[in-house]
């Protein structure tokens, strides 16, 4: 997940995968669609201690911050394999990619995948979806897509690997939902949210 500034606009790259991100119908977090704060870190190996309000410390840099929001794009906090974005405030020091994210004491609650990044605090305008592996079903009309194991089965637009779809407008993006087309097929859906 990387943010790209382009001509005064900014983008956040998200990757949802089957192990928690696509096995059940999912949507883009409101924290991404309309950020309350503009600074964030990408993380992996997130645990159940990764919660809003916690003060975190960089295991190598000793940088500090307060967690304002947590977005999970794959894995689970309970399983200790969550990945996604942590929105942070009250930053001191310089966070380093690859360092452990700790709370008071030596308890590791994740690993930083990036330095601190920023995004404008404005609503999302566009979302570019790219199906990377396996088929994914999507809906942006307010309905929930279903996979092959659901009743009724196979609801929503079918995206095949390497297919791209652009969704424009706040209502369409905020109503967007997605799921593996075939239950537990471990699909991967890349989403670039533009502001």
Image (tube, rainbow, N blue to C red):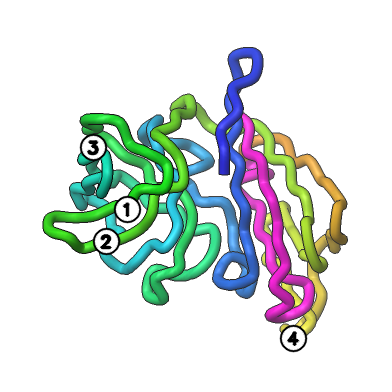
Q: Which residue is mark 4?
A: 149
Pointer 4 and pointer 2: residues touching (CB < 8 Å)?
A: no
Task: Indicate which disc residue 63 carries.
Answer: 3
| SS at badge 2 | strand
Label 4, label 3: how far apart the Cα atoms are: 46 Å
Label 4, label 1: how far apart the Cα atoms are: 39 Å
Q: Which residue is mark 1?
A: 100
Pointer 2 and pointer 1: residues touching (CB < 8 Å)?
A: yes
- Horizontal side of 195 relative to 167 (left or right) equals left
Instruction: Indicate the position of residue 39 as horizontal and vertical percent values.
Output: 38, 32
* 21 w.r.t. 121: above or below: below
Pointer 4 and pointer 1: residues touching (CB < 8 Å)?
A: no
Pointer 2 and pointer 3: residues touching (CB < 8 Å)?
A: no
Label 4, label 2: how far apart the Cα atoms are: 37 Å
Q: Which residue is mark 2?
A: 108
| SS at badge 3 | loop
| SS at badge 1 | strand
- Horizontal side of 73 relative to 173 (left or right) equals left
Q: Is residue 181 magenta?
A: yes
Q: Quadrant of the C terminus?
A: top right
Lower position in the chain sequence, tag 4 or tag 3? 3
Q: Residue at x 34, y 66 (%)?
A: 47
| SS at badge 4 | loop
* 52 w.r.t. 193: above or below: below
- Horizontal side of 164 relative to 90 (left or right) equals right
Instruction: Indicate the position of residue 159 as horizontal and vertical percent values.
Output: 84, 59
Lower position in the chain sequence, tag 2 or tag 3? 3
Residue 144 visible in the picture: yes
Q: Which residues are magenta?
A: 171-195
């Amino acid at each position: 997940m990387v943010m790209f500034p382009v001509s005064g606009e900014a983008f956040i790259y998200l990757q949802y995968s089957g192990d928690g991100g696509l096995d059940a119908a999912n949507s883009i977090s409101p924290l991404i669609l309309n950020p309350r704060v503009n600074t964030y870190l990408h993380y992996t190996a997130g645990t159940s201690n990764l919660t809003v309000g916690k003060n975190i410390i960089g295991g190598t840099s000793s940088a500090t911050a307060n967690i304002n929001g947590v977005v999970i794009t794959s894995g689970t906090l309970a399983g200790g394999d969550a990945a996604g974005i942590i929105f942070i405030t009250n930053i001191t020091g310089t966070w380093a990619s690859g360092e452990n994210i700790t709370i008071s004491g030596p308890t590791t609650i994740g690993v930083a995948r990036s330095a601190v990044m920023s995004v404008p605090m404005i609503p999302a305008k566009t979302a570019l979806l790219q199906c990377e592996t396996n088929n994914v079903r999507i809906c942006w009309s307010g309905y929930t897509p279903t996979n092959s194991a659901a009743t009724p089965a196979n609801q929503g637009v079918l995206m095949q690997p390497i297919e791209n779809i652009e969704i424009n407008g706040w209502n369409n993006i905020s109503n967007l939902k997605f799921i593996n087309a075939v239950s537990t097929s471990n699909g991967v859906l890349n989403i670039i949210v533009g502001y």
